[in-house]
Amino acid sequence: MSENATRPSTLTQEFLEGLVQRVPGSSGNTWKLTEVYTGDLLVELPQSSEDDIKQAFTDARAAQRIWGSWPLRKRLKVLKKFHALVLENQYLITDLIQAESGKNRRMAFEETCDVPMGTSHYIKRAPSLLKDRKHAGPVPFLSHSTEVRRPKGVVAIIAPWNFPFATGISDTIPALIAGNGVVVKPDNKTALSPLFGVGLLEVAGIPPGLVQVVCGEGPDVGEPMLSQADYVMFTGSTATGRIIGELAGKNLIGACLELGGKNPMLVLEDANVDEAVHAALFGGFGNSGQICMHIERLYIHDSIYDEFRDKFVAATEDLKIGAAYDFSADLGSLVSVDHRDRVASHVDDARDKGATVLTGGHPRPDLGPAFYEPTILEGVTPEMLAGSTETFGPVVGLYRFSTDDEAVALANDTDYGLNASVWSTDKDRALSVARRIDSGNVNINDILATAYASKGTPSGGLKQSGVGARHGDQGLLKYTDGQSIAVLKKQVMEPQKDQTYEAYAKQTQLSLKLMRKTRFR
């Protein structure tokens, strides 16, 4: 292993043990949280019992009553300080993300950027979204209603291992701005960066106990969390998302679920091939393929297929894969040996059933326990695991198409609909294709970042890729309940004095016609 893989001096044992002290663990059970590059133990992570979880919600609810009573301006002042603290500690957070997840430094650094971007957007947008809004009532001039936005209460945030800081903390921020308390459940493998982020929130000035962190395996903590929560934000697999959705329904709480994907990239015949090849390197292999929105199905027009394939294979073979706490590596590790084996099983299954491995296709134990080569497959069919199931690794299949209609049909031939990418030098043509793709996000001449980083636009999945969205106005409003407070100034919504109901009915009918004709209502 290279000298660049030496664990940063910032991650001292005292520092790491201080982070995990925040996690309640009355059972005494712990999880061995390891450095992915080496497999060495980083720290013992306490596992939260059902009683610990109940107490976490009790404490968050008590603090929420204080936080929710603060005027929005005061809450936003805290979030502005938090924004600055994240930027001050950005490289330390990058170190934590790399150690716990094994991703390369570029991806770890870019993950840290998501939190200040989202925080800044909602600091700016919240005053408009959360203010009281006056609406016309049923009787012009004599009635009106006011729409009031109230916090849900305590929100459960269940964050995945692939982007622990970006999801665990970025999803927490709008919930806090809306006036809620939060209980975060990070994945055991990647709990350190969310724990550090919660610490920064407390330094910034949130009331003590407002944001809690509980840890444990999903089957152990999921049901206790949702029995206490007022809303749940979940990011993870479609299979687990169904369970979360059922639990939310059982407890009559709202849920936002960002789930799996089998995302397509369409390269039309007029695309800039060199630009598309360069983008496909990130699309297929960014974060070692462990991005919910990354590309697993790459459709190339017949007329440029051979050129694209040859250039893509050559560029992939030039990628540098390795363990490095600097920016030298293009790819890092997969998150665990178990996940490496899952990715390998998809490639082996495809190879056994007749697919061609154009490059890659092997683990790299010489680099670290969970490394796997970037892999390009040809001849993948729906009967193969890699043809229909989300692989979630550095594996991409190449396919041909002849017409735009065929490309759209192939892109839509999946149960998923999270992200898609369309490449063309004709913007109008690309836009026409994009509008026909069944996907919550579609990028033109980009892979995923333009859509995901557009914080003013909702980002969510269609079909089996999820329910609801983060980002955009609904990314904040989902953490609120709308309350209608209506005022009637005079008792006119019934017959007056000696007026018969028949006369009142005719008067009402005439009023409805006049209001529509004059566009008053």
Image: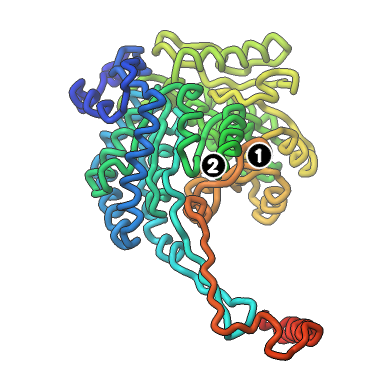
Residue 212 horizontal/vertical position (percent):
34, 37
Front position in the image: 105 or 302? 105
- Dot 2 amino acid type: Leu
Vertical placement of 196 versus 381: above or below? Answer: below
Looking at the image, residue 285 sits to the left or right of residue 63; the answer is: right
Which quadrant would residue 304 be assigned to in this image?
Answer: top right
Whether residue 160 appears in this view of the structure is yes
Looking at the image, residue 215 sits to the left or right of residue 487; the answer is: left
- Residue 417 is tagged as 1
Badge 2 density bin: few <14, some 14–19, many ≥20, Cα 10 Å = many
Which quadrant would residue 375 be assigned to in this image?
Answer: top right
Vertical placement of 467 versus 505: above or below? Answer: above
Front position in the image: 316 or 344? 344
The residue where tag 2 is placed is 448
Q: Residue at x 71, y 37 (%)?
A: 411
- Dot 1 amino acid type: Gly
Vertical placement of 366 versus 121: above or below? Answer: above
In the picture, which quadrant includes the N terminus? top left
Residue 245 horizontal/vertical position (percent):
59, 36
Front position in the image: 68 or 4? 68
Upstream in sequence: badge 2 or badge 1: 1
